[in-house]
Image (tube, rainbow, N blue to C red):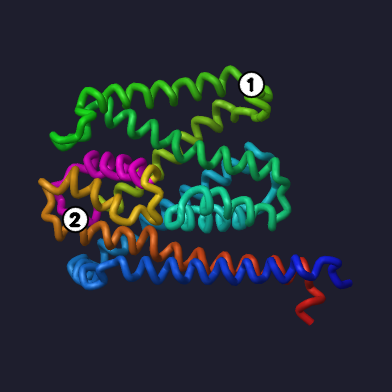
Amino acid sequence: MRSRHPYWKRIGRIAFVAFLATVAVLLALYARSVDWAAVTAAIAGYSAGELSIAAALALLSYLIYGGYDLAARAYAHHALSTRRVMLIAAISYAFALNIGAVVGSAGFRYRLYSRSGLSMGSINRIVAFSVSSNWLGYLLLAGALFVTRSVALPADWKIGATGLQALGLAMLAAVLAYLIACGWSHGRILHVRGHHFRLPSPRLALLQLALAAINWSVMAAIVYLLLPPQIDYTMVLGALLLAAVATAIAHIPAGIGVLEAVFLALLGATVAQPQLVAALLVYRAFYYLGPLIAATASYAAFEAKSRRIAHPANDS
């Protein structure tokens, strides 16, 4: 049976092709922004064992991130398979890192989960749970580092050690307030300015914190592995956490230039600039560029399969 709205189908196909073309342009621009000679030299300087561990850590991080959506499955009470949930999370994460959280993390989750048959209410809960998981883990780790003054700031940064410590206390207080609220709510529906939501159970809240804190730690471990051995891991973690906020504020795709600027400011006095830049370029290759290519192919396959299932007669 033919659709009563052929124009909408055509518009959908054009939009899909336009999206793939946009991603192709993004990849081309990304490739032009990378100093491939430096990447080649850096890879040549690393052992096969170091590169294998870095790749394994990047894969581990994406798997842990998929755990956000698996935990969200219990929170949203849906029954999608673990394989599909992990695939959707990985695609969304890769695009979120490279083109921004609004389009990547939220937009792709809405598209892929709706294609998988979930209602808008369930998807809203998944997005809220996953995004909050990521930043709750961030608050916990950053708060602990800042309170203990584990991150040495450059002298010209206005916030200073005391200001950063106060910020850390506020972060930890926010995490504690969240846990208390989860324990207090006991599954009640909360109403705030016309929006209705339910906080997760204390067990799920603790799982959120654990997954996200581990994930941020693994991300920092990739950069730490690629740097000279004299660098302190907590400084690398602190630089990564500060760079994440700077990237979110700057709204630059993939945080190109922002990540490097923060690391150079915090570690430039300890690590030679060529070594630091080379490590970050290799980190980008493993954590940003490679997953983006894989996510683009996976998303195209996902859409093609969904279209065949929805319109089997059109394939004959």
Q: Residue 232 location in percent, x, y?
A: 18, 42
Q: Residue 240 location in percent, x, y?
A: 30, 45
Q: Are circles 1 and 2 on residues that touch, CB within 8 Å?
A: no
**Callout 1 secondary element:** loop
Which span is picked out in magenta?
A: 225-247
Asked where in the image residue 83 lies, by quadrant, the reply is bottom right
Q: Overall secondary structure of the magenta stretch? A: helix
Picture residue at 24% right of the left edge, 26% below the top: 148
Q: Earlier in the sequence, mark 1 or mark 2?
A: 1
Picture residue at 36% right of the left edge, 46% below the top: 250
The residue at which mark 1 appears reads as 186
Instruction: Note whether 115 is above or below 2 in the view shown.
Output: above
Asked where in the image residue 183 lies, by quadrant, the reply is top right
What label sits on residue 276 in the rendered view? 2
Q: Amino acid at mark 2?
A: Leu
Q: Is residue 185 left or right of residue 297?
A: right
Image label count: 2
What label sits on residue 237 in the rendered view? none
In the image, farthest residue toward the right:
1
Along the line of sight, the residue nearer the viewer: 129 or 204? 129
